[in-house]
Structures are given as structure tokens and as C-alpha cells.
Amino acid sequence: MGKHEFLTPKAIANRIKAKGLQKLKWYCQMCQKQCRDENGYQCHIRSESHLRQMDLLKESPSMYMQGYSKQFQDDFIKLLSRRWGTKRVHANLVYQEYIADRHHVHMNGTIWETLTDFVKFLGREGICQVDDTQKGWFITWIDNSPKALARQEAIMKKERAEKDEEERTRKLIGEQVERAKKEAEELGLDDKEIYTELKRETEEEKIKLNLTLTKSTNLTSNTTDKVDCAAENISLPTTSISFSKPSTQKKSLSALVKKSNPMAAQKKEKDKEQPKKLSAMEEIIKEEMEKKKRMENFKINGSKGDNRRKDDYKDSRNNRDYIDREIRDHRDYKDNRRDYRDRERERERSHKEKDREYREKERERERDRQYDHESKRIRRE
């Protein structure tokens, strides 16, 4: 049965079917021809053009296989690095997106028979980090580019610097603690404090707190011109707690004389400095006087204040109008920018659609030329 005529419904249907993706096992990589079924593939491998390509393959099979394998690996790694980067992803997901391109290099033309073999090869070469799980093979791309290595080195250098800084600060703190301990030992100071309980031997005894402030200075000098030594010893305030029974002796008159208390003198001075409180009548009179002063000031400066308030009102209204106008202009500017971006997107979309249609037409013309050429050759034969 011969082929259908050019531009007949059957020929057009066949060409439409040939546009989409077909099964990979019916694709000839050497001839770059996709067959639609097993019968078409068997007919193709028996054709003269395919046999000529096989003769070329027999001359240097390793060159062709290595070339297709290298191209397949480069395209696969490029898609993986651009689409997922260094994320962990299922290998079959990457492969499905790779074969979505109709003009990709098929795996049956490479040195790997299955995707598993290819994934194991990537793991052995150190290109990807490979994981075999119950859900399948997962791969993670290892970025060995100079920029990535420089970035990792900078991060590691920063971490090392932070660790060194922490160690230095820890060492300095330790040295300060040791120095403080040595100084305390030299001075004979103990860090530990001993706490004791306050207990009465008998219930009749009273607790007395004696606070004494003593300041003694000892100055010694000779009759000669030279001063041998001058020392001043200041003793800190000491507190002593004593327990004693209440005394029943009579106090003398001299003991009853009040002692001078410096704190009481300070309190008297503070009381003198504070002003006296006004009575209710004095406060009312003061408020009336202040009201009269305010009324007189208002009568004198009333006209000036009215004009000033009018000017302030005009300024505020002008400022409000200016702000509203600025907001309106900014909103219009945003709307114009949005419309401009929408128009640009629409223009780019239309250009892309036109380019796609042009490429499709070019492919159809090329197929038609090939179809005509084959049909003429078949007629001549």
C-alpha cells in the first residue's frame, strides 16, 4: 500500500500525530527519527538511509557513543543546576522534565542503559550526591564552581574568625579571674562569707547596735628640716552587736542633756527652705489676680492672635491640599507604571507567540520538503 498524496486528510493527520512526543524506544538517535509504532521502527531500521548511518557508526562506535553521552550528561546537569540548584530532588522528576524537550538526546544512544546506571555514574564521579531510598533514587547537585568555592571559603573563614574571637575572650576572662584570685590570696581575703545566727542566751537581754565612726591620724615629725615619715590611718566604720541586761541605775543630769545630732540640723534647714502653704483665701485671691492679667493680655494681643490663627488655618489648608495633590499624583504615576508594564508583557507575549508560530511553520515547511523529496525518490524508484 503506497503513501497518501501530499496534503490529503490522511497525510495531514499523520503529520499532526508526528508533532507530539512519541515513545523513546522507537527513536533512532543516529538518524534522529521518531517512529510512531513498532512496525514503523522495524521498517526504518531496514531502510537504506539507516543502514548507511550504521556503516558510519561501525567505523568509530566509541566516538559516537561518547559524544552522545557527553551531550546527555551536560544537558542533564545544566537542567538540574538551573532548575533545582543544590536541593535534593528525585532523579526521575529531573529526567521527566528533561525528556519533555522533543529534540533532546535520548538515553538509548548513550553508554547507559537505564536511569539508575546514569545516577550511579554521577555519584561515582562526584558530580552529585546520590541517595537510594524506598521511593527511588534522589540526587543533590554538588556546586564546584569557583564562585561557590570562594563563597564557602569566605563563610569558613568567618566562622573560624568568630571561634578565635570567642576563644580569645574566654582566655582573657580566665586570666582576669586567676589574677583576681592571686590578689585576694596576697591580701588575705576570703571569698567565702560565714553567716551566724543571732541567739539570745536569756529572754530578758536586749539587742544593742553600736555604730562607731573612728578616724585616727598619726603624724610624727622631727625637729630637723627633713620629714622622716607621715602616715594617716583611717579606720572603716565598725558595727558591734552586744547583749546586755537592762540597767536599773539612775542616770545623772549630765547624761540627760541632749546630744548634738547633725541629722536633726539638716532636717531643720530643709524645713526652712520649703515655702509656707497658702490658706484657702490667699489661693482664691491669687487665682483672681492671674485671671485679670490674662484678660488684659488678651485685650492687648487679641487682634494679633486672630490674624495669626487665620494665617495658620490658611497654611494648614494649603498643606492639606498639597498633600492630597501629591498623593493623587503618586497614585496616577503608579497606575501609569502598571499599565506600561502590562503593555510590555503583552507585547513580549505576542512576540513570543509570533516567533513560536514562525518556527512551527518553518518546521512544517522542512517536513513538507522532506516528504516531497522522499515521495519523488520513491516514484523514481
Image (tube, rainbow, N blue to C red):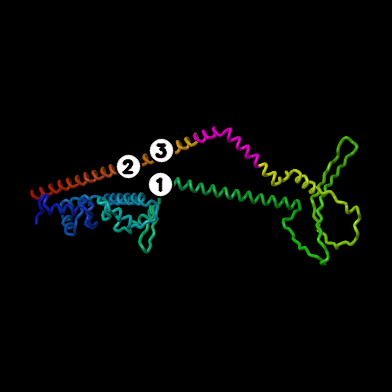
Q: Earlier in the sequence, mark 3 or mark 1?
A: 1
Depth check, mark 3 against mark 1: the one in front is 3
Depth check, mark 2 against mark 3: the one in front is 3
Task: Give the structural element (helix, strand or loop) at label 3.
Answer: helix
What segment is highlighted magenta in the picture? 287-310
Residue 297 magenta-drawn?
A: yes
Task: Tell me which residue sits at (65%, 42%) in the image.
Answer: 287
Q: Is residue 196 above or below residue 346?
A: below
Q: Earlier in the sequence, mark 1 or mark 2?
A: 1
Which quarter of the figure is the N terminus placed in? bottom left
Residue 104 magenta-drawn?
A: no
Label 2 crowd (10 A; few <14 / some 14-19 / many >=20): few
Q: CA distance from mark 2 to mark 3?
A: 21 Å
- Residue 324 picture quarter: top left
Q: Earlier in the sequence, mark 2 or mark 3?
A: 3
Q: What residue did someone put label 1 on?
A: 145
Q: Say if mark 2 contacts mark 3, CB within 8 Å.
A: no
Task: Tell me which residue sits at (54%, 48%) in the image.
Answer: 162
Q: CA distance from mark 1 to mark 2?
A: 41 Å
The image shows residue 271 at horizontal and vertical percentages of: 76, 46
Q: Amino acid at mark 3?
A: Arg
Q: Amino acid at mark 1?
A: Ser
Q: What residue did someone put label 3 on?
A: 325
The image shows residue 147 at horizontal and vertical percentages of: 42, 45
Q: What residue did someone put label 2 on?
A: 339
Q: Is residue 162 above or below residue 39?
A: above
